[in-house]
Amino acid sequence: MEPVLDRRTLGRALLERQLLLRRSGLTTEAALEHIVGLQAQVPQDPYVALWSRLAAFTPAGLSALLTERRAVRLTLMRGTVHLVTAGDCLALRPVMQPMIERRLLSSFGKQLAGLDTGPVAAAGRRILDEQPLTAGRLGELLREQWPDRDRLALALAVSARVPLVQPPPRGLWRRSGAAVHLPAESWLGRPFAEDSTPDSAVLRYLAAFGPASVKDIVVWSGFTGVRAVIDRLRPRLRPYRDENGTQLHDIDGLPLPSPDTSAPPRFLPQYDNLLLSHADRSRVFLTDEHRQRFLLSGREKRGGLLVDGFVHGTWRIEERNGSATLTVEPYVPLTARDRAAVVEEGERLLGFVAQESEKRDVRLT
């Protein structure tokens, strides 16, 4: 009989491994590797995500990783843009490559029907090796050779077959820049890893997000054939069950925090992987209604507020005329103690995000 883990135990384990029970002393680079990168299609999201996790995080430090080519932005897990270390870019992209081709190209199957995407990818790489371009401009140049094809579909065919990074200034702190693309190997000056088996990536997921089910691993990664991977890794894993009887897997020897461990308030960005990397998200959301409300709030670019380890509401910051306001909208009434802790953490967040604003205010609706 596998031990049964309730959702508070699973939640505390997730918070511990995601560096959210207490701020970690890890460096920014080490933290990125520990949590296997950060979803980053919103360029400023990783800064808030790391500020909430690290004791000595500075925006300049993360921006320096990007300009020094020690960290990059590229398409990885779930076919979405992630911020990862250069080493993880080279190690993870070959593992994710089949999924990326499958997902990205399936969106434009009709537009690419009957087209050999190999020559398109080769042409796109030659163009991008000469200069970084947006997807739109790349597509325009490719249409000179394939005039009967959709320009976005052509650019997508390149990005699916050729690993592309988004170089700075995209992703720098408080900076904006177009999402231009360059071949990752050219930018980093190093080749990709030859090993494309997913075993190591699955182990890293479990270390950062476990204990987890096969479906959880699929949601995080987009992999197929995960059960076969688990079978290969089984001697290194410890089995559990959740309260619904679903089998969970974890790396043997990793401890689990007590479900009564204190979890302070944390502000997470809209697309934090903590909120997106499980099929069963009851370890993060108190109710399914809260989960649905949070997904809908994405249209308003709201982040998630954690109280006692669960999403208790959303937040956003508005800056105008030298003032910055953090508006917090809880899903449920907060105790006086929790309200005070949320305001205190919110004031620290405003001091980080809007330190140049003369007036800063936290509002709980």
Image: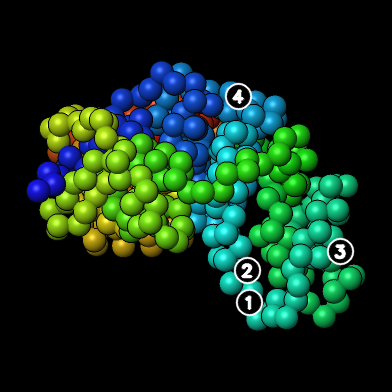
Identified by mark 1, the residue type is: Gly
Q: Secondary structure at mark 4?
A: helix
For the residue pair 320 and 3, the one nearer the viewer reads as 3
Amino acid type indicated by mark 2? Leu
Rendering coords of residue 303 (x, y %): 40, 47
Point 35% across, 45% down: residue: 233
Dot 3: few (<14), some (14–19), or many (≥20) neighbours within 10 Å?
some
Disc 4 + disc 2, Cβ < 8 Å: no
Q: Which mark is residue 109?
A: 1
- Residue placed under numbered mark 4 in the picture: 60
Q: Are marks 3 and 1 in contact (CB under 8 Å)?
A: no
Mark 4 vs mark 2, foreground winner is 2
Q: Residues within 10 Å of mark 4 (few under 14, many from 20)?
A: few
Coloring applied to the structure:
rainbow
The three-letter amino acid code for the residue at tag 3 is Leu
User: Label 2 near label 1: C-beta < 8 Å?
Assistant: yes
Question: Is there a contact, CB below 8 Å, between mark 1 and mark 4?
Answer: no
Residue denoted by label 3:
141
Q: CA distance from mark 1 to mark 4?
A: 41 Å
Quadrant of the rendered structure where residue 10 is?
A: top left
Q: Is residue 138 left or right of residue 318?
A: right
Task: Measure how far apart labels 1 and 2 are at the Cα level.
Answer: 6 Å
Q: Is residue 154 left or right of residue 315?
A: right
Work out how far the residue at label 3 is from the one at label 1, CA to CA, in angstroms: 21 Å
- Badge 1: how crowded within 10 Å, few (<14), some, or many (20+)? few
Mark 2, residue position = 105
- Foreground mark, 3 or 2, reads 2
Name the side, left or right, on which 63 lies relative to 130: left
Residue 332: x and y, percent? Answer: 19, 50
Query: How far apart are the alpha carbons under marks 4 and 2?
Result: 36 Å
Q: Position of residue 39 (x, y in %)?
A: 50, 46
